[in-house]
Image (tube, coloured by chain):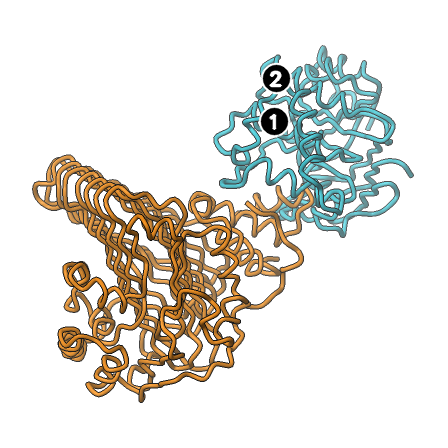
Chain colours: A cyan, B orange
């Protein structure tokens, strides 16, 4: 029950089926990686978990600690403790990070959050991310570089403290220093009360966030699972190797 | 910026209450010579002013209704009451002198409290007359004048005559002529050379009589090197029939002076709000208009700055919010008439439901205004598919060395932004309200705090249940 479980999930956008029966379990307390070639449906899965209305779910279930959340709106899912770190966070001009983050924290906790409590949390998160306080008065993602946007996603993760997080290609476009900072943020969240699904195209990130399990998606399904060594094997042999193996198996 | 205040969400327009006030004199309906004479008689005016009014009445009667801009066909000028004297007391110096029913209204609106806490002076107009005016004593000692315009006319006649109707003459437009004929109430402000008034002066306008026209007239003279911030706020209860508010604001900003005029009109949505605001800005002086249009049925208002001497500068910031049944036809006008003058216009409008917001602006650079610079930025946000916005930017440049820029954007609330904010736990309408607040933030942050809070509250109220 204490897990994020995806059961036989089928989904489409504009009539095109992207997810074709995804099965995947992330137990609370574990960090899993989701790998796969471009177009496998990894990012789609992330957005559907968060409730993106652009997609139509045709079949299946998403169970958060045993409760099916498919009928819930994105904000209800978030308040239940699900978090998506976006691959491409949008800009919201005129809304400061501080103002937005406090509103989000209040929504997450379902109560007023005093200034002292809020600053306490934010300061710790900023220190961990090596980030300047000045960012808090910047407008949400406006004019941010790719790296700043990713760091801002991890800042939100640290402050909102979700139960389950999905990180969608948080490593893409990051230099090695930024990558280490992001990994530090995610690793700080690790513990018995937190589960994460780290979506990545490359093995590189997994040197810093060592996963408990690795799942591989292809053509809208999870086709392979294994320990951290699976990621290394994929890195060495490429996705074509796995594609061949899947074909042989089928 | 304030947070989402759940306690006040879902409240209706909170100024709808009707006051139990029995006026001491009500003019007959319509605008006739007899009504003008009655207004003049009740004010005990000098003869020259009655002549001015009657001349303006002729101009008003001759000028046709404007054929451009919003639909004014619902405005029945024959049926309006043009003058209501609420009480015998005029321009009291303490709230105690004001009849209790009227005083209660201002207490309900929080004016005496604001006066104690954050303002340098307060004026309060009720229907046709200013019932209260007071400026802090130390400012009075420095020669600051902040009184009802009628008192300005009588007590400071020479100063008054030197400037009155020189910035906005009755010939300017039909509604300026109407105001010139029927004017009543408004403030007379004089800031002596070098005096800097740190806290704002605020005038508060309340209309209580139905089918009524309020014609306040304000004259502000900011002498050389002086500084002032003047705020005007407006409310009225909702009646089933239309009312009219036609103000004329004249401001003279002398060499090296700085002034800011902030208006937040939140009239009920049966009000026609047709206002002429103009400032003459002299050498190295700076004038700022901050204009918020939230209420009314139709608003036509284009605050204007005439930059008359070298180095004069102006900034005009405006926000308009038009919901179903409202047409906000607002904008700005800058005339750059001297070398090295500069002006900026920033206009942001939000249209919701079938609301319509129009930007109408003029930037004019006269021949010889070497190196003059002006920049216009107007952004419109549409909430619903049936919402409407129009832009009418007029630019006339007679001077080769001038530089004028114009930028306009129209945007919609973006689904990706909504999803992103929702994924952090904000409800859909909270997310939309946050986006709207962000849109106007560059202007809202310039507002006095209580108005910024009020603006946020209004946006949250308007956005509640508006999407999805």
Q: Which sits in the foreground, A223 or A162?
A: A162
Q: Residue at x 78, y 37 (%)?
A: A22
Q: Residue at x 58, y 47 (%)?
A: B2
**Circle 2 residues within 10 Å: few <14, some 14–19, many ≥20:** some
Q: Which sits in the foreground, B249 or A13?
A: B249
Chain assignment, label 1: A
Relative to B175, is B443 above or below?
above
Relative to B81, is B432 above or below?
above
Chain assignment, label 2: A
Mark 2 — residue?
A: A178
- Compared across the picture, whether B8 is left or right of B177 comes to right
**Circle 1 residues within 10 Å: few <14, some 14–19, many ≥20:** many
Q: Are marks 1 and 2 in contact (CB under 8 Å)?
A: yes
Residue lying furthest top = A236
* Residue B387 x, y percent position in the rendering: 45, 61
Relative to B128, is B168 above or below?
above
Q: Which sits in the foreground, A45 or B406?
A: B406
**The C terminus of chain A - image quarter:** top right
Q: Secondary structure at mark 1?
A: helix
- Compared across the picture, whether B263 is left or right of B257 comes to right
Mark 1 — residue?
A: A150
Residue B62 can be seen in this image: no
Dot label at residue B58:
none
**Looking at the image, is mark 1 or mark 2 earlier in the sequence?**
1
Picture quadrant where residue B154 is located: bottom left
* Residue B142 x, y percent position in the rendering: 30, 48
* Residue B185 x, y percent position in the rendering: 31, 70
Give the distance between the C-alpha atoms of the residues marked 1 and 2, in whole angstroms: 9 Å
Relative to B222, is A34 above or below?
above
Q: Secondary structure at mark 2?
A: helix
- Compared across the picture, whether A120 is left or right of B433 comes to right
Do marks 1 and 2 both belong to one polypeptide chain?
yes
């Amino acid at each position: 029950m204490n897990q994020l479980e995806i059961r036989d999930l089928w989904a489409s956008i504009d009539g095109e089926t992207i997810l074709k029966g995804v099965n995947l379990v992330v137990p609370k307390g574990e960090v899993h990686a989701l790998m796969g070639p471009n177009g496998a449906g990894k990012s789609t899965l992330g957005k559907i978990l968060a409730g993106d209305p652009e997609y139509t779910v045709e079949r299946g279930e998403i169970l958060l600690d045993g409760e099916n959340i498919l009928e819930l709106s994105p904000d209800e899912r978030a308040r239940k403790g699900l978090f998506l770190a976006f691959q491409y966070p949008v800009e919201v001009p005129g809304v400061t990070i501080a103002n937005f983050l406090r509103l989000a924290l209040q929504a997450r906790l379902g109560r007023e959050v005093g200034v002292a409590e809020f600053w306490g949390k934010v300061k710790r998160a900023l220190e961990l991310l090596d980030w300047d306080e000045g960012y808090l008065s910047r407008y949400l993602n406006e004019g941010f570089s790719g790296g700043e946007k990713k760091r801002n996603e991890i800042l939100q993760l640290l402050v909102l403290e979700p139960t389950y997080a999905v990180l969608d290609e948080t490593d893409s476009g990051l230099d090695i220093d930024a990558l280490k900072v992001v990994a530090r943020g995610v690793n700080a969240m690790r513990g018995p009360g937190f589960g994460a699904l780290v979506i990545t195209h490359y093995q590189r990130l997994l040197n810093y966030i060592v996963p408990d399990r690795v799942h591989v998606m292809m053509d809208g399904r999870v086709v392979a699972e294994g320990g951290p060594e699976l990621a290394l094997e994929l890195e060495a042999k490429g996705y074509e190797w796995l594609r061949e193996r899947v074909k042989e198996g089928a | 910026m304030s947070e989402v205040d759940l306690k006040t969400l879902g409240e209706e327009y909170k100024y709808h209450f009707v006051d139990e006030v029995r006026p001491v004199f009500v003019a007959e309906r319509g605008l006739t010579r007899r009504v003008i004479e009655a207004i003049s008689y009740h004010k005990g005016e000098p003869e020259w002013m009655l002549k001015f009014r009657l001349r303006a009445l002729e101009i008003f009667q001759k000028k046709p209704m404007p054929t451009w801009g919003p639909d004014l066909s619902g405005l029945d000028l024959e049926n309006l009451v043009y003058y209501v004297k609420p009480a015998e007391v005029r321009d009291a110096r303490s709230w105690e002198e004001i009849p209790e029913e009227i005083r209660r209204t201002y207490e309900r609106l929080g004016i005496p409290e604001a006066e104690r806490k954050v303002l340098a002076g307060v004026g309060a107009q009720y229907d046709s007359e200013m019932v209260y005016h007071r400026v802090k004593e130390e400012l009075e000692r420095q020669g600051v004048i902040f009184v009802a315009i009628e008192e300005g006319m009588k007590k400071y006649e020479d100063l008054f005559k030197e400037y009155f109707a020189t910035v906005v003459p009755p010939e300017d437009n039909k509604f300026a002529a109407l105001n010139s004929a029927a004017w009543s109430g408004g403030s007379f402000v004089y800031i002596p050379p070098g005096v800097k008034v740190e806290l704002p002066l605020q005038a508060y306008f309340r209309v209580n009589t139905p089918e009524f026209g309020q014609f306040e007239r304000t004259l502000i003279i900011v002498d050389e090197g002086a500084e002032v911030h003047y705020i005007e706020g407006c409310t009225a209860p909702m009646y089933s029939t239309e009312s009219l508010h036609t103000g004329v604001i004249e401001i003279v900003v002398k060499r090296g002076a700085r002034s800011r005029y902030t208006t937040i009109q939140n009239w009920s949505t049966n009000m026609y709000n047709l206002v002429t605001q103009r400032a003459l800005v002299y050498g190295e002086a700076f004038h700022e208009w901050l204009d918020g249009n939230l209420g009314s049925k139709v608003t036509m208002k284009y605050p204007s700055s005439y930059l008359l001497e070298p180095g004069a500068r102006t900034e005009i910031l405006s926000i308009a919010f038009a919901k179903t049944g409202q047409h906000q036809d607002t904008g700005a006008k800058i005339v750059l008439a001297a070398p090295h003058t500069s002006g900026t216009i920033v206009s942001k409008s939000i249209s919701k439901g079938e609301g319509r917001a129009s930007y109408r602006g003029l930037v004019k650079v006269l021949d010889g205004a070497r190196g003059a610079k002006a920049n216009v930025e107007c952004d419109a946000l549409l909430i619903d598919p049936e919402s409407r916005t129009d832009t009418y930017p007029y630019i006339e440049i007679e001077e080769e060395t001038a530089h004028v820029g114009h930028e306009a954007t129209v945007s919609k609330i973006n689904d990706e932004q909504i999803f992103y904010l929702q994924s952090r736990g904000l409800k859909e309408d909270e997310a939309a309200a946050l986006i709207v607040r962000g849109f106007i933030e560059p202007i809202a942050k310039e507002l006095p705090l209580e108005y910024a809070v009020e603006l946020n509250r209004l946006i949250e109220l308007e956005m509640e249940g508006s999407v999805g």
